[in-house]
Image: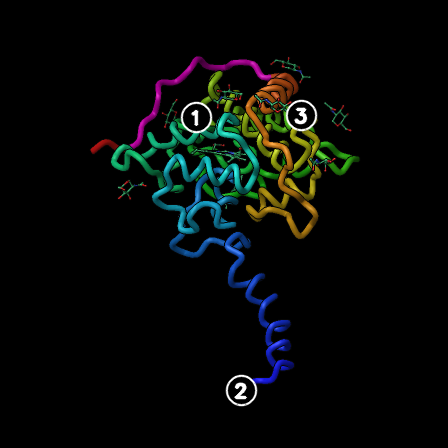
Amino acid sequence: MPSLKSLLLLATVCIPYAVSVDTDDHRWIAPGATDERSPCPGLNTLANHGYLPRNGKDISIPMILDAAKEGYNFAPDTAILAAAKFGLLSNSTATTTLNLDALKLHGLIESDASISRGDFALGDNLHFNETIFSTLANANPGVDYYNTTSAGQVQQERLAISLATNPNVTNTPKEITLRSNASAQYLMLMGNPITGVAPKKFVQIFFREERLPIAEGWKRSNVTINGTTMGVLSVAIQAASNWTVTQDCEPLVLGPMD
Ligand code: HEM
Ligand SMILES: *[C@@H]1O[C@H](CO)[C@@H](O)[C@H](O)[C@H]1NC(C)=O
Ligand SMILES: *[C@@H]1O[C@H](CO)[C@@H](O)[C@H](O)[C@H]1NC(C)=O
Ligand SMILES: *[C@@H]1O[C@H](CO)[C@@H](O)[C@H](O)[C@H]1NC(C)=O
Ligand SMILES: *[C@@H]1O[C@H](CO)[C@@H](O)[C@H](O)[C@H]1NC(C)=O
Ligand SMILES: *[C@@H]1O[C@H](CO)[C@@H](O)[C@H](O)[C@H]1NC(C)=O
Ligand SMILES: *[C@@H]1O[C@H](CO)[C@@H](O)[C@H](O)[C@H]1NC(C)=O
Ligand SMILES: *[C@@H]1O[C@H](CO)[C@@H](O)[C@H](O)[C@H]1NC(C)=O
Ligand SMILES: *[C@@H]1O[C@H](CO)[C@@H](O)[C@H](O)[C@H]1NC(C)=O
């Protein structure tokens, strides 16, 4: 029979190991070769931390809402519910779930002049691209944070690049709202959700690694982030982006039908 001392030794050696390695469902793990990811760093990060299925497949709307609340403290009205419902149109065969890869469907949610992905007509609209991201990485020089002003300037610069290089660029009122909402989301998630001031270090880790920078000091917001807050930031970002319409709205794009 083991001595009390050896049991205590086992307890001190084994229990912390078990807690940090075996039972921590939400540690970051890079996606494997067969795991699907999307053009959205927000959804990919949730999958990389196991708040969404790590394989990126068969994801329902309630699963997205729960993951956004649990991982980010985002309420459903932060455009998550709308985006998730809309995302179901990316695959009309699967009516109640979506796979992350299908969200790359151009013109549904995926659009041109993204801040971390290339334009569809120019090649890869799915994976993170450091060249595209350099506009955001180098924004707001001289300080260690991004804010609504710099987020708007990034959108203005990225759109100018797309207008200059992509002969098939789509730039309608739908895209500016999507872009400004997405920018509001990275500021709220990585920084102060009310002021929209976010440490550069956290934002860069989020985009480049699709990882929550917990080891670097990031904490999940202790107040639930809602759509009202997001709307205020989104409007400020759009104003700072000096956006002007170059096209009217495009018809809705749907995924493959049966
Ligand atoms: C959970 C909170 C979410 C956060 C923090 C978030 C954040 C972001 C950010 C920052 C971008 C901009 C990426 C870029 O321009 O390069 C983005 C794009 C995108 N998001 Fe999300 N998102 C969230 C939820 C969702 C949901 C629920 C859906 C749909 C099911 C979605 C679908 C997309 C898609 C398709 C894009 C690509 C748009 C593009 O072409 O730039 N996102 N998201
Ligand atoms: C669409 O959904 C069907 C049924 O779940 C699935 O077999 C197929 O792989 C999906 N296609 C895409 C592009 O996600
Ligand atoms: C070109 O733009 C149209 C919308 O204006 C879109 O339907 C189509 O998918 C785009 N094609 C490419 C290759 O970008
Ligand atoms: C990243 O984007 C740049 C600029 O559009 C492009 O030249 C480059 O080929 C892209 N890289 C990859 C790996 O797609
Ligand atoms: C964002 O930061 C820059 C650099 O500090 C500053 O000039 C600008 O006024 C800030 N914007 C807001 C809305 O505070
Ligand atoms: C929430 O976090 C903020 C910023 O870290 C802190 O000032 C505040 O006291 C916290 N509120 C609660 C209820 O924990
Ligand atoms: C949204 O969040 C803000 C800031 O935390 C809070 O003052 C407001 O009451 C919230 N609104 C709703 C409808 O929950
Ligand atoms: C952008 O966010 C606002 C405020 O939450 C919301 O009313 C609007 O529907 C969103 N637009 C898109 C295209 O997601
Ligand atoms: C805003 O856009 C207009 C036309 O689109 C341009 O003439 C003006 O120089 C821009 N202003 C800034 C500050 O970028």
Label 3 secondary element: helix
In this view, the residue farthest toward the bottom is: 1
Name the residue beneath numbered marker 2: 1
Percent position of residue 198, x then y: 69, 35
Percent position of residue 45, x then y: 52, 45
Q: In this orientation, which residue lies closer to the viewer: 134 or 38? A: 38
Secondary structure, magenta segment, majority class: loop
Q: Residue 199 is drawn in which quadrant?
A: top right
Q: Which mark is residue 82?
A: 1
In this view, the residue farthest toward the left is: 258
User: Ligand 9, what quadrant?
Assistant: top right
Q: In this orientation, which residue lies closer to the viewer: 45 or 228? A: 228
Q: Which mark is residue 148?
A: 3
Q: Which residues are magenta?
A: 243-255
- How far is the residue under mark 1 from the one under mark 3? 23 Å
Quadrant location of the C terminus in the rendered image: top left
